[in-house]
Image (cartoon, coloured by chain):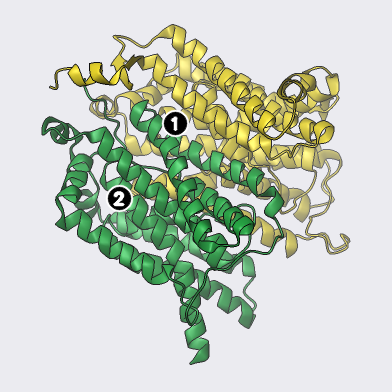
Chain colours: A green, B yellow
Amino acid sequence: MDMFYAVALTIMTAATPLLLAAVGELVVERSGVLNLGVEGMMIMGAVCGFGAAFYTGSTGIGLIASIAAGVSMSLLFGFLTLTLVSNQVATGLALTLLGLGLSGLIGEGFVGQPGVKLWSVAGIDPLIPGAILLTAAVSYFLFRSKAGLVIRAVGDSHVSAHSLGYNVIAVRYLCVMFGGACAGLAGGYLSLAYTPQWVENMTAGRGWIALALVVFASWLPWRAVVGAYLFGAISILSYTVQTFALGIPSQFLSSLPYLVTIIALVVISGNRAMMRANTPACLGKPFVPDR
Amino acid sequence: MRILLEKRSEASTLMAISSPFIALGLTVILGGLIFALRGFNPLEALYVYFIEPLTTVWSIEQLIVKATPLVLIGAGLSVCYLANVWNIGAEGQLTVGAIAGSAIPILFPAWQSPLTLMAMMLCGVLGGMAYGAIPGYLKNRFNANEILTSLMLVYVAQLFLDWLVRGPWRDPQGFNFPKSITFEGWQLLPTISGAIHLGCLFALIAVIVLAFVMGKTLKGFEIRVAGNAPRAGRFSGFSRTRMVMFCFLLSGGLAGLAGITEIASTVGQLQPQISPGYGFAAIIVAFLGRLNPIGVLFAGLLLALSYIGGEAVQISLGISDKIARVFQGILLFSILACDTLILYRIRFLPRHAAAAQPAE
C-alpha cells in the first residue's frame, strides 16, 4: 500500500506541471493564438522561481516570481505576434530558444545549490489540487461565462468578433498573458516541488508535451487532466521499471514519454472530423484590425 | 500612445534587404546592454565578441567550419518554411545522420578507401532523410502536427545515440568512456586548407544548387506557391502531401549530411554530445537568411560568429559562453519584429487620436 501511495504521489507531481502548462496554453489557443514558446516560458519560470526562493527562502515568493517570468515572456510574444503581426510559429520558436538561452545564463550560479521545497501535506503539495481546481475554473469560465464565450468567438472568427465590437487584440493579449502565467507557474513547480534544484534545460521538453496535450485534449480542459495524468503515469512508469532492472536500457524507457506523445498525436489527429469540430478556426491566423 | 499598422500597397524591397541589418543592429545594442548589466565594458565586450574573431586566419577558418552544418541545415529548413512545412526536428535528423554514417567505420573499422568516406556520407544523408520522413508521413497519413512530432523525435534520437555509445558501439579500448572508436584516414573528411575541410564545400554546393532550384525551376515555383497560395497550388494540381514529404526528405537529408560531416571532421568519433544545438540554431539561420539559400550562407556565417564570439568572451573576459544562445534568441526575435516593416508601415498614434478614429 505504501508503495502504491508513493507511486500515485509521484504520478501526481509529474502530471501537475504538464496540466498547469497545458491548461494555460489551451486558453491561449482557444483565443486563436498558437504560442509554441511554452517550453521557453516554463524554463524561465523554473529559473526565476528557483532564484527568488533561493534568495528569500520563501517558496511563495518563488512561485510569484515564476508567474512574473512567464507573463513577461508571454508579453514579448504578444507584442511581436499581436502588435507587430509576426509569424506565430516562428515567434513561438524564438521564445523557446531565447528562454532556454537566457535561463542558462541566469541560472549559472544556481547549479548545484540546494533548493527550497514547497510545503506539502502527506506528500501532496497545494498545487496538485490547485492545478485541478484551475482546470475546473477554466472549464467553467470558457463554457459557462460570457467572457469565455467572447474568447471562443475571437478564436473561431476574429473578423465577426471584431465587427461585433470586441477588441480582438486585447482579448488575445489577456489570454496570452494567462498562458504565460500558467507556463511560468508550471516551471516554478518543477524547480520548487518536483525536483527542488536548478538544472539547465530541466524542463526537458515538458513544454512541448504540454502543447501536444492541448491537441490530445481536443481543446477541452477536462480531457487535459486525463492526458496529463496519463503522461505523468507513463514517465513515472519508465523510472519505476528502471529500478527493477529488467534489462531494458534506461534510454529506451526515458524516450517513452516522447514516443507516447507522438502516438497520442497520431491517434487523436487521425480523427479528422473531431479535429475539425474542436480546433479553434482562427488558430495561428494573424489579425490586423482595419483601424 | 498606440501602435497602428498600415498595410503597404506592395512589399517594401528596401525593408526586405535592410531588415536583417536592422535586426543585427538591435541585437548588438541589446547585447551591449546585457554586457553592461553584468558589469563589463560593453564596447570592449562587443569588440571581443563580434570583431576580434574576424581578425585572425585561424578564427576565420573556425568560423567557416562552424558555419558548415548551420548552412547545410538552414538551407533545407528555409525551403520547408517557405512551403509552410514546419520541420523543427533538424537536430534529431542530424543525430540520426551522424549515427547512420558512423555505422560504416564502427562496423567495418578496417575498411579504408575513398569509398568508405562516400559510403559514410551517403548513409548520413539517407539516415537523415529516413528520420525526416517519419514526421512527414505522420503528417500526411494521420494529420499529426509536424512541429510536435519532429521535435519529440529529437529527444528520441539523442537518447538512442546515448544508448549506442554507452552500450553496443562503445570503444572496447576506450577506458569505459561513452565514446566510439576514433575515426582515422578515409573515415575522416580530407582538409582543403587549414581547418577547412571538404564538408564546407558540401555546404557551398548545397546553397548553389538550392538557389538554382528555387530561382529557376518549376519545383522552386511550386514550393513558393505551396507557402503563399496553397489554394492556388491545389487548383493547379500541386500535391500537398508530396510537397510535405519532399520538404522533409530534403531538409532531413541535409541535416543528416551535416551530422555525418561534423562527425567525420570536427568530432572524429561518436559521443553522447555531437552538436551544440546546430539543428535549432539553423532555424534562426533560415529566418535571418530571409528563407533564401544565398541569404542562408551569410546568416550561417553570422550564427557561427555568435558561437565563436561566445567562446572568445569566455576566454578573454570570463563572461559565460551561454551568452551566445541568448544572442541567438534575441537575434531571431529582432528579425521577426523587423520583418513586419516589409509588409506594414508603423504609425504611432497618441491615445486620444486613436480613440477618435471611426470604428468600422
Residue kind at label 2, given as amino acid type: Val
Q: Is residue B303 left or right of residue B267?
A: left
From the viewer's side, name the closer residue of B320 and B62.
B320
Q: Residues within 10 Å of mark 2 (few under 14, many from 20)?
A: many
Task: Return the x and y of residue B88 as percentages of the image width and height.
Answer: 50, 41
* Figure check: A259 above or below B121: below
Query: The C terminus of chain B lies in which quarter of the figure?
Result: top left
Quadrant where the image shows the N terminus of chain B: top left
Residue density around tag 1, few if under 14, some if 14–19, many if 20 or more, within 10 Å: many
Q: Mark 1: which secondary structure? A: helix
Q: Residue at x 62, y 19 (%)?
A: B298
Residue B185 place in picture, x, y as percent = 86, 40
Tag 2 residue: A27
Toward the bottom, the furthest residue is A1
In the rendered image, the residue lying farthest to the top is: B14
Q: Where is residue A210 drawn, in percent x and y?
A: 42, 56
Q: Quadrant of residue B289?
A: top right
Point 63% across, 69% down: residue: A250
- Determine which quarter of the picture holds residue B184: top right
Front residue of B268 and B236: B268
Name the image quarter holding residue B73.
Answer: top right
Viewer-proximal residue, A268 or A218? Answer: A218
* Label 1 chain ID: B
- According to the picture, the residue beneath numbered tag 1 turns out to be B81
Residue depicted at x 29% and y 24%: B229
Q: Are marks 1 and 2 in contact (CB under 8 Å)?
A: no
**Amino acid type for the residue under numbered disc 1:** Tyr
Q: Is residue B168 visible from the viewing direction of this image?
A: no
- B337 left or right of A162 in image: right
Give coordinates of residue B125: x percent, y percent.
61, 40
